[in-house]
Amino acid sequence: MQIDFHNGITYIVARLAGFDHPQAEAIAHCAQYVDDATNSGLIRFKNGMVFNHISSAHKLLDYRNFRALANYRVWIPFHFLPGNEGLRASQKPAGSFIHKLICRPNSYIAQDMLRECLRLRQTPHGLYRLGIAMHVYADTWAHQGFAGVNHPVNEATQLVDWRGNPDRKFTQKVQAYFKHRTGHVLSGVFPLGHGAVLGHPDKPFLRWGYTNGLKEKISRDNPQDYLEAAEHMCQWLQRYQLGDPDAQVSGLPLGDKAIIAEHLQSIHHDDDDLRYRRWLTLIAQGRFSFGKAQVSYIHKGKGSWKHQALRTEAYLDTGTEVFPYHPNFQCSHWKFFHEALIAHRTFIVDTLLPHYDIHVGVAKPAPLRR
């Protein structure tokens, strides 16, 4: 998914779940910032204090750069959450280990991730942790059928359009993308994640299909998948409000759900920013039951969360910066986001996945608390 869903629709869903404007904007900001947090390492201050932060973003990486992308600590916890074939922790999927790693929508692993968010909802970075989890949860629909590792299961052939006819134009685009600089298609390597189909899973309006690395014919209906994701997100956000992961909740109001469904299909821009602007216009016009609102998102530079926390407008860190310390850093959005980011990754890699007998980290597994 891209900014139109991760920020725009996440904001809408959060408001419909009962969060006020500042809370919903923080949740939606975190959900999108997972795709934009490209810097990592130690932040050094002139008073001697240091702050560690990590990267969750793949935006500056290239699907053709296979070695750089083989990063279990970015792709798996933040973008391709393993699905254990949709089974509970006590159940083992048939086949080899790769079947555990394939992303599945609304998996028990994803639901356990959200249960942990509810358990820790009173922590200072609880709301930010929720926003990060909303990104990961939504992507279990968009990235279903793919794994966040370099493996033949991610192969995609016989690409078809919404009519089921061969999509030769897109096939040629994929082939051109993966050609080596010498003009020859790379051999002996397999795409990571959904690299073999480029951005198709991330465009809300597409209906398409392909044959996967298991030789299964897959039909994808992105508008339906995205609407289902929005519905389940709303339900979990309502449970978060109640502090009860098992609460029976109503989900999206029918009128609002119809508006979301309509525009998931009708906004056809390939450019995600143009799609995002259309959703912001709908919000500003008061098309949803929560009324009119002004939503903005600045990921880097002046006005961004990082700028507010560190007074820097730079898009990339060199690692040599020493920042002036301001007391408001301690309660800044940027600091809380990065604390939540580390907490999320640690929980997913060291606790949740080992509970499902999925080991992708190096630390000793920690017990899962209920």
Image (spheres, helix red, strand yellow):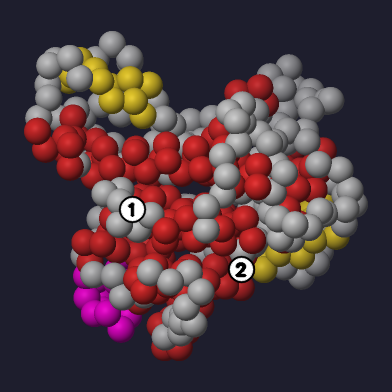
Q: Residue furthest top?
A: 320
Any magenta on residue 284? yes
Q: How many marks?
A: 2
Going 80% across and 61% down the picture, which residue do you hit? 218
Going 23% across and 70% down the picture, which residue do you hit? 20
Viewer-nearest of discs 1 and 2:
1
Q: Nearer the viewer, residue 155 or 17?
A: 17
Q: Position of residue 350 (x, y in %)?
A: 57, 37
Whether 141 is drawn above or below 184: the answer is: below
Going 67% across and 68% down the picture, which residue do you hit? 221
Q: Is residue 127 left or right of residue 364?
A: left
Whether 352 is drawn above or below 265: the answer is: above
Which three-letter amino acid code belongs to the residue tagged 2? Asp
Q: In whole angstroms, how far apart are the C-alphas of marks 1 and 2?
A: 27 Å
Q: Secondary structure at mark 1?
A: helix
* Contact between labelled residues 2 and 1, with CB atoms less than 8 Å apart: no
The crowd level at tag 1 (other Cα within 10 Å; few <14, some 14-19, many 20+) is some
Q: Position of residue 265 (x, y in %)?
A: 54, 73
Residue 279 shows in the view: no
Mark 2, residue position: 225
Stretch in magenta: 280-293
